[in-house]
């Protein structure tokens, strides 16, 4: 579990810190807060892998989609598609935009649901297997990595900017940046612009941070519960079983809810980009 | 909690997944859903139409039955009337034939009786003449007494 030189079992602090360290391209924990030369290999692997799984599942359903009697799998995907389509219809009032926005929402929901679900695997299972292959660090939940969630929320931001310009025209959008929300007066231009920038920033950061925070906290609680079992006492074992079961059941709700919230906010933000102030 | 290039990679992956979903996943599923919705709507409409058709047909059947029954009653009444007429005619004809026959028979019988009477009268006259010839045995001219005989003959009538 620990990287080698210490002979003793890891302390609780070491265990947690070790589990919260990414397998990155440098081979050791990233020290700088922002370092664009570093890649989190574990996040990349699991998010791309689960993205491929998402696409395979969805494409399997799509290739078998008929207007006849659906099978269970097809019906399940169809329920999801219908749910996303209904939400998109209620929030984004442009049929043309929905051709892209609704699939985005579906992808986001399905993908995040799968990435969040990685939390259900025992916290030590995949890192332990990785260790057998010489990988000393591994975090298996891509949505518990701020890079993963902010990457997606910035993607949503870019879509919002695209639709702002597409719907209102570049001039119209710039005009809106300086005249909304407080009104068209030269004195208000800087305030309006500042407010707009804060709004975009807050939307994007909170969008990514919300998902990240939930999943990170969930992962951390699983680790603490695992620590309890790690004491190898009767109390620890019982505590692990009881607390682990309760938290896992509760986490099912969080996994689905956070995926849904991320999807809904994606739709809401893109819908806002369609509306003029 | 550190930011690094993973963010950019995730951003790119996000758009690739979204694009593939938009291109290959969403349209066929939505198309199938719309088609199925249309199919179901059509089916329901067809069922409604069939139901109303059935009701219509049942109404028509009742109507036709009623008409058939009515016309059957009419036909029977007409037939009965006709048969009664035929019967009456036949009866009248029969009565007429019987009366005719009876008349003919009576006439024939009357003629026959007349003829028999005539014959009898002739014979009686002959007998009387013969008897008188025999009784009188006298020269009596039958011619001379013809008036007498004729009177006698008349009396025998």
Image (cartoon, rainbow, N blue to C red):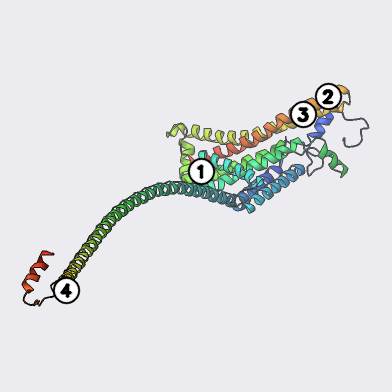
- Circles 1 and 2 on the same chain: yes
Local packing at callout 2 (Cα closer than 10 Å; few below 14, some 14-19, many 20+) is: some
Residues tagged 4 and 3 counted as in contact (Cβ below 8 A): no
The residues bearing labels 3 and 2 have C-alpha atoms spaced at a distance of: 11 Å
- In the picture, measured across the screen, residue A276 lies left or right of residue B23, that is left
- Marks 2 and 4, how far apart at CA: 176 Å
Dot 3 falls on which chain?
A: A
Looking at this view, is A185 or B88 the one in front? B88
- Residue under numbered circle 1: A164
Q: Are marks 3 and 1 in contact (CB under 8 Å)?
A: no
Which residue is the site of mark 4? B134
Q: Which mark is residue A101?
A: none
Q: CA distance from mark 1 to mark 4?
A: 171 Å
Tell me which residue sits at (68%, 42%) in the image: B7
Rounded to the nearest angstrom, the CA distance separating label 1 from label 2 is 55 Å
Residue A106: x %, y % from top left: 61, 43
Secondary structure found at label 3: helix
Chain that bears disc 2: A
- Label 1 or label 2, whichever lies nearer to me, is 2
Q: Label 2: which residue?
A: A238
Q: Which residue is mark 3?
A: A245
Which mark sits nearer the N-terminus, 1 or 2? Answer: 1
């Amino acid at each position: 579990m620990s990287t080698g030189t210490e002979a003793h079992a890891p302390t609780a602090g070491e265990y947690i810190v070790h589990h919260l360290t990414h397998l990155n391209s440098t081979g050791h924990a990233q020290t700088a807060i922002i370092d664009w030369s570093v890649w989190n290999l574990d996040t990349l692997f699991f998010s791309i892998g689960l993205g491929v799984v998402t696409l395979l599942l969805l494409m399997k359903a799509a290739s078998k989609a008929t207007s006849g009697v659906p099978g269970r799998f097809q019906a399940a995907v169809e329920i999801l598609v219908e749910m996303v389509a209904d939400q998109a219809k209620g929030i984004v009032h442009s049929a043309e935009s929905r051709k892209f926005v609704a699939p985005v929402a579906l992808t986001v929901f399905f993908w995040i649901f799968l990435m969040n679900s990685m939390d259900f695997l025992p916290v030590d299972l995949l890192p332990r297997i990785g260790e057998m292959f010489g990988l000393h660090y591994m975090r298996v939940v891509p949505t518990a990595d701020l890079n993963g969630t902010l990457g997606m929320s910035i993607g949503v931001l870019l879509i919002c900017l695209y639709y702002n310009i597409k719907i209102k025209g570049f001039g119209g959008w710039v005009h809106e940046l300086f005249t909304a929300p407080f009104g068209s007066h030269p004195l208000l231009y800087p305030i309006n612009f500042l407010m707009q920038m804060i709004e975009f920033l807050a939307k994007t950061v909170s969008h990514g941070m919300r998902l990240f925070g939930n999943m990170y906290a969930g992962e951390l609680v699983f680790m603490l519960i695992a620590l309890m079992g790690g004491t190898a006492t009767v109390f620890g074992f019982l505590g692990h079983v009881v607390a682990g079961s309760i938290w896992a059941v509760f986490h099912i709700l969080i996994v689905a809810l956070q995926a849904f919230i991320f999807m809904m906010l994606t739709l809401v933000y893109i819908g806002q980009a369609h509306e003029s102030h | 909690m550190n930011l690094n290039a993973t963010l950019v990679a995730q951003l790119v992956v996000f758009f690739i997944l979204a694009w593939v979903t938009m291109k290959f996943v969403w349209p066929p599923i939505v198309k199938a859903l719309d088609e199925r919705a249309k199919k179901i709507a059509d089916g329901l409409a067809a069922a409604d139409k069939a139901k109303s058709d059935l009701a219509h047909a049942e109404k028509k059947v009742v109507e036709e039955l009623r008409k058939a029954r009515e016309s059957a009653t009419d036909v029977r009444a007409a037939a009965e009337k006709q048969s009664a007429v035929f019967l009456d005619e036949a009866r009248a004809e029969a009565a007429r034939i019987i009366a005719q026959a009876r008349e003919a028979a009576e006439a024939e019988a009357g003629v026959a009786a007349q003829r028999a009477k005539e014959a009898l009268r002739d014979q009686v006259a002959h007998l009387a003449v013969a008897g008188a010839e025999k009784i009188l045995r006298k020269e009596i001219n039958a011619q001379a007494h013809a008036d007498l005989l004729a009177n006698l003959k008349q009396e025998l009538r």
